[in-house]
Amino acid sequence: MPSLASMLFGAPARRPTGYNHNDRERSSGHGTGPTMAMDETPTPSTKIVRDYRELRTPYLQKRTEALALLHHIASLVAPIMRAHNWRIPLLEELALDTSRLLGYHEFAYDRSVKICIRLRSQRNPSTAFGELEDIVDALLHELAHFDEKQHDDAFRELWHELRDDYEALYPRAKKLPRSTACGE
């Protein structure tokens, strides 16, 4: 299947050389997202994701920002999801008690039920979010599971293609981490 970049721009898909991403974590905020020109604003993702849910733990601050961040990351990957005809019934903030897990998905009857993504920094989860590129990369990882359930070579190839597609859509954005390791 041709990559989204080649479908949109006629360019051949790039093959990454690999990058070892070792759970980079920052206590700073997530920023404003990829640096992009005004005409590159992502399209709304209302039909791509049916529902969103932030953590509703009383001691956590910035719940509205977490919900807005879920909407933002969905809008960033919406063109990729449309190209693959993927839909997410529920995009949810990952619970904090899941150790170092960055995301997971649930399937029922071979269909996606929900994707959970870690938004908050492990060092200061009450007030700080992780880096946007790490959050988007975790979402792309979970989306790759829509077609490839196991963490095998086919999965890694699809995950790298999704990263390439994202970087082609947002060339001014900070590059995504290029880990080949999958937390299982």
Image (cartoon, grey):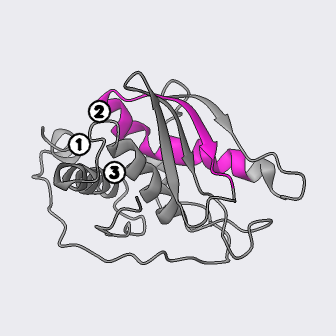
Q: Position of residue 78 (x, y in %)?
A: 43, 38
Q: Position of residue 19 (x, y in %)?
A: 28, 76
Q: Nearer the viewer, residue 43 or 96?
A: 96
**Which secondary structure dominates the residues rendered in magenta?**
helix
Is residue 125 one of those drawn in magenta? no
Residue assigned mark 3: 169
Which quadrant: the C terminus?
bottom left
Q: Nearer the viewer, residue 24 or 155?
A: 155
Marks 3/2: CA–CA distance: 12 Å
Is residue 78 one of those drawn in magenta? yes
Q: Nearer the viewer, residue 148 or 90?
A: 148
Q: Nearer the viewer, residue 34 or 62?
A: 62
Marks 3/1: CA–CA distance: 9 Å
Disc number placed over residue 83 in the picture, else none = 2
Disc number placed over residue 4 in the picture, else none = 1
Q: Amino acid at mark 2?
A: Ala
* Mark 3 or 1, nearer chain start: 1
Residue 7 occupies quadrant? top left
Is mark 1 in CB contact (under 8 Å) with mark 2?
A: yes
Residue 50 occupies quadrant? top right
Q: Is residue 34 above or below residue 12?
A: below
Is mark 3 in CB contact (under 8 Å) with mark 1?
A: yes
The secondary structure type at the circle numbered 3 is helix
* Mark 1 or 2, nearer chain start: 1
Disc number placed over residue 101 in the picture, else none = none
Q: Amino acid at mark 3?
A: Leu
Q: Which residues are magenta?
A: 66-95
Q: Is residue 102 left or right of residue 87?
A: right
